[in-house]
Image (spheres, rainbow, N blue to C red):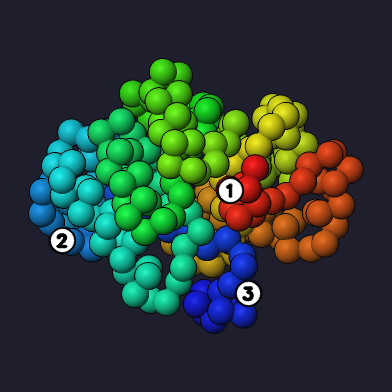
Amino acid sequence: MARDDWRENPTQDMGVHITLTSEWSAYRWRPMLGARGGLADDDGFMHHRPEQVVASADPIAVADEMLAQVERTLADGFRPTHLDAHMGTALLPEFVWSLMDAGSRYNIPVLACSDLGPLSDAVRMQGVDAGFLAEVAAEAKRRGWPVFDRFMIGFCPDDVAFEAHLDGLLRESGDGMVYYGMHADTAEGMDAFAPHHTKPRRKEYDYFSVPSSASFLEKRGVKVIIWSDARAQ
């Protein structure tokens, strides 16, 4: 279904969400390369947390796993617009340079932000400070990739209207080019393993599935761009 949708509109963003962790207890996934180089836990699945990957995985195996994920995406017929990172793991100091090399190999820009604070807070990323982010941003610019000013993320509480929640996120993000990490999906089946994520994800999906969301953003001076626009900035 995703490939059919992309073929109908190949100008849309379609990134590779490089995945090195498997955080849920009742729904797990394995590395594409299998349990080699510390990529997997004792049960054969990816580690739950980013810090576990740092502690257990060989960076060379991580680099190979990232390449395998990109190559599988290409083999499936997609032409990715960008690479980003599930739970921020691939953006950590131990792995980000290999991720950027993977991006350069296939001419796919890697997500770079001057401020990853909201993502770092959400997943408790370690080792991501201002100096490191400045170094990554400089390298991204050197490779001709865009650098976002800030990463924006946050699930809407059950008792808050999504529009009010979004308005708060926009106010906190300030001016500049902001990368919005949303989870807009139907959350079908998530009640079985992550019921606390069902309502927030569905709220995002319902809100951004109707044209009124665009007018809300326009009234607040927000221009929505895609990766090709960001690369042209």
Task: Nearest to the eye among marks 3 and 1: give it.
Answer: 1
Are the residues flagged by discs 2 and 1 in contact, CB closer than 8 Å? no
Label 2 CA crowd tier, 10 Å (few <14, some 14–19, many 20+): some
Dot placed on the residue nearer the N-terminal end, 3 or 1: 3
Residue drawn at 31 percent across, 61 percent down: 69
Label 1 CA crowd tier, 10 Å (few <14, some 14–19, many 20+): few
Q: Secondary structure at mark 3?
A: loop
Q: Is residue 204 above or below residue 50?
A: below
Q: Is residue 15 above or below residue 132?
A: below
Q: Nearest the camera: 119 or 10?
A: 10
Residue drawn at 85 percent across, 39 percent down: 220
Q: Which mark is residue 9?
A: 3
Q: Which residue is mark 2?
A: 34
Q: Which residue is mark 1?
A: 231
Name which quarter of the figure residue 73 lies in: bottom left
Identify the amino acid type marked 1: Arg
Alpha carbons under labels 2 and 1: distance apart: 35 Å
Q: In screen coordinates, is 178 left or right of 35? A: right
Identify the amino acid type marked 2: Gly
Q: Secondary structure at mark 1?
A: helix
Q: Is residue 76 above or below residue 120?
A: below
Q: Nearest the camera: 152 or 135?
A: 135
Does residue 163 appear in the picture of this structure? no
Residue 209 location in percent, x, y?
A: 73, 63
Alpha carbons under labels 3 and 1: distance apart: 19 Å
Identify the amino acid type marked 3: Asn
Q: Nearest the camera: 186 or 224?
A: 224
Alpha carbons under labels 2 and 3: distance apart: 33 Å
Q: Secondary structure at mark 2?
A: loop
Residue drawn at 53 percent across, 50 percent down: 197
Does residue 142 appear in the picture of this structure? yes
